[in-house]
Amino acid sequence: MAYAYTNQRRVIVPGPHFVDLQTVIPAPVGFPTGSFAVVNPRLRPAVPQIEVLVPIAPPAVAPFRFTVNPALLIRMDEERTQSLLRIVLSWIKKVAWQRRFPRHLIMSTSATILTYGSYGLGVHGSESDIDALCVGPSFATMHEDFFIVLRNMLQNRPEVSEIHCVKDAKVPLMRFKFNGISIDLPYAQLKVNSVPENVDILNPFFLMNIDDTSWRSLSGVRANIRILQLVPNTENFQAMLRCLKLWAKRRGVYGNLHGFLGGIHMAVLAAYVCQLHPNASINVLISKFFETFALWRWPTPVMLQDEMAPMGVDVSEVRSLMPIMLPCSSREYCHSNITKSTFNRIRSELLRGHAMTRDFLRPDFEWGTLFEHFQYTKIYVRFVRIFLSASDQDELGDWVGWVKSRFRCLILKLEEVQGLCDPNPTEYVDPDVADPNVVFYWGLQPGRSRFTDIDYVEEDFIKSINHGFQGPRGIIEMSIVEASELSKNVKIDSGNAEEPKACWRMPEYNRQMKPIYSQYLPYYFVGYVAKAEDTSAGG
């Protein structure tokens, strides 16, 4: 069969509990690369076990030269993380002193910083954000010590600016700029008295009895470490992943909040192909990537060959059309927001990539065509326009980040009333509006009935975003526009608009603040929180 390689073995694992594997639905009208069959995502019981293809003893593939832009091969900037580590070491000793620990314990206690994401994998660019995890011992709490004490210490540093606390996210974190580079810093609390700088986060000893929030915070770091351990050639993997992320962004299928592939999804898929073809050059790997996943039997899970990991998988929470397993000692699936619409878009781009790269040995083959921007206005004649604005740029960042975190609800609603939609992740700005604003243009499926009742969809979505948001509410307006009505300032097919990383914070604004004193050292001031609720640490 086209999807079965001779260098794969079959492994039986429990399957996702919601897909009817026996039926297919036709390809949506208007999506590129022609028609194809996709899995019907109806919520129905599935068979209790499914087969997973795992690479074994891959054959050697003759290398073929593929030129990578040297500007992309940027060394990891250790200076920032080392500076941040020194701050964290001072912080944990301060916390130990507040606990009135003996002097020798204060001197010996330690915490550490672990990087992950594109930075941890070594595929970041010069302006990329840094994902870093603060790992502390059992006596350092998230609520007081991390979000108040450490926050105050960071705020007093000249190289740190724009500190935001994100406490109501699935993975709570601080976001700030360190010498101009944005850093996301969640916190994990281990059940030990001291965390060594080079802590082996894959060691089960350090994971014993930790809380759920710390477990989620550690997942990204553990997945990154295991991926780098499992790929046969790190440099080829990194170069391949850079190219694939560029492809996904140019083709409009990158961004977890919009229901597309996120960084961890791309990393696991790239690592799988690297395991399958350990001796292949970069261009062969890219071609094999598209061949493998264009013909993949979704929703068969993708999993890396990992002898350390048990084969039992807990799939009670799986709700994905493209299940991708995290390569950790305790098997989990990558969090996914993929819907019927975005699954079709991703698969159509995989098929396009496969059709283009299977003949890459031709003398006239041009790699550049693979990375061309997706031409939205040539595919769609109607768009949903989502306009967001606020009174200032800070409030806009909070508002946009919150709304984006609820986009999956909107995508599902549009699928219900209109059919498939294409949630273009790019953010645009309307220059004719004085207030700071962000605009999204989502393609509507051609050939369907003339959907016009956007007010009903907007009302339903507003109910979703109003639940849980704190702080001044911005403006949201939705409308349907024709492609011919798009402003000349909206270069929707060029992809030149910048897409800032989503974030919202619990703003302080004009709320009264109250001082917080240490629970362990009477009359010792540690910071401020809002009087109404202790959810936003101030300084």
Image: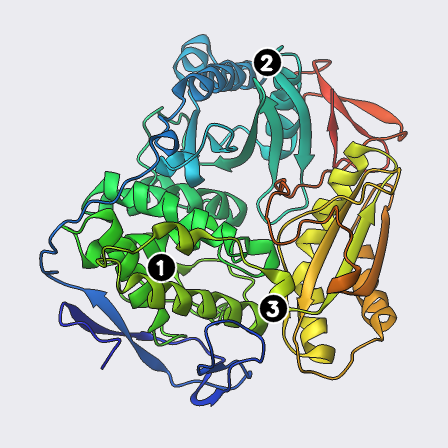
Q: CA distance from mark 3 to mark 2?
A: 46 Å
For label 2, the SS is loop
Type of amino acid under label 3: Ile
Question: What is the basis of the colouring in this image?
Answer: rainbow
Amino acid carrying label 1: it is: Arg
Say which residue label 1 marks.
Answer: 331
184 left or right of 113 in image: right
Whole-percent x, y for residue 264 in the image: 43, 50
Q: Quadrant of residue 184 in the image?
A: top right
Quick one: 38 or 361, which is closer to the camera? 361
Residue named by callout 2: 159
Residue 217, labelled with which disc?
Answer: none
Tell me the quarter of the picture where residue 394 sits.
top right
- Marked residue nearer the N-terminal end (1 or 2): 2
Residue 319: tell me if it is visible.
no
Categorize mark 3 by other alpha carbons within 10 Å: few (<14), some (14-19), many (20+): some
Q: Position of residue 388 (x, y in %)?
A: 80, 49
The mark nearer the N terminus, 1 or 3, is 1
The residue at 55%/83% (across/down) is 43
Q: Residues within 10 Å of mark 2 (few under 14, many from 20)?
A: some
